[in-house]
Image (cartoon, rainbow, N blue to C red):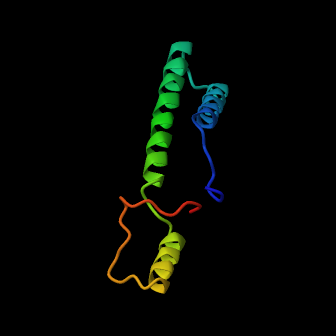
Amino acid sequence: MGKEPALTAGTITAFVTALIALAVAFGLDITEEQRNAVLGLIGPLFAGILAASAIIRGLVYSPNTVARLETEAYSEGATGTALTPAQSPPSGT
């Protein structure tokens, strides 16, 4: 994940908190209970989304990884084999 931005639930919660503060500063009438309800929803919601994306990330391969694996298989003389999502890529990918 070297080139991908890493968003955390804390970062997203801080951003939503700042948006709420900005909206209140411009006249949005929101109670403390409403603010807490929004913030209480944001943290677990985005934590779940991030967890799901981490799981999905482990099930897909980048085009460069697929090309490298195909090249390695071809150079080793393998024919008719295909990499499936159930197979683990070599370490370091």
Is 93 on the left or on the right of 57, as rendered? right
When the figure is inspected, residue 86 is found, relative to residue 10, above or below; the finding is: below
Direction front: furthest residue: 76
Pick the residue in front: 1 or 47: 1
Q: Give the mark count.
A: 0
Percent from the top left, x then y, of residue 87? 39, 61
Percent from the top left, x then y, of residue 59? 42, 56
Is 15 on the left or on the right of 76, as rendered? right
Is 23 on the left or on the right of 83, as rendered? right
When the figure is inspected, residue 60 is found, relative to residue 37, above or below; the finding is: below
Which residue is pictured at 50% across the width and 42% down the height? 50
Percent from the top left, x then y, of residue 63? 50, 72
Which residue is pictured at 47% across the width and 64% down the height? 61
Pick the residue in front: 31 or 69: 69
Considering the image in quadrants, where does the N terminus appear?
bottom right
Direction left: furthest residue: 80
Which residue is pictured at 60% across the width and 44% down the height? 7
Instruction: Locate residue 92: give its quadrant.
Output: bottom right
Which residue is pictured at 35% across the width and 84% down the height? 79
When the figure is inspected, residue 40 is found, relative to residue 49, above or below; the finding is: above
Considering the image in quadrants, where does the C terminus appear?
bottom right
Percent from the top left, x then y, of residue 90? 51, 63
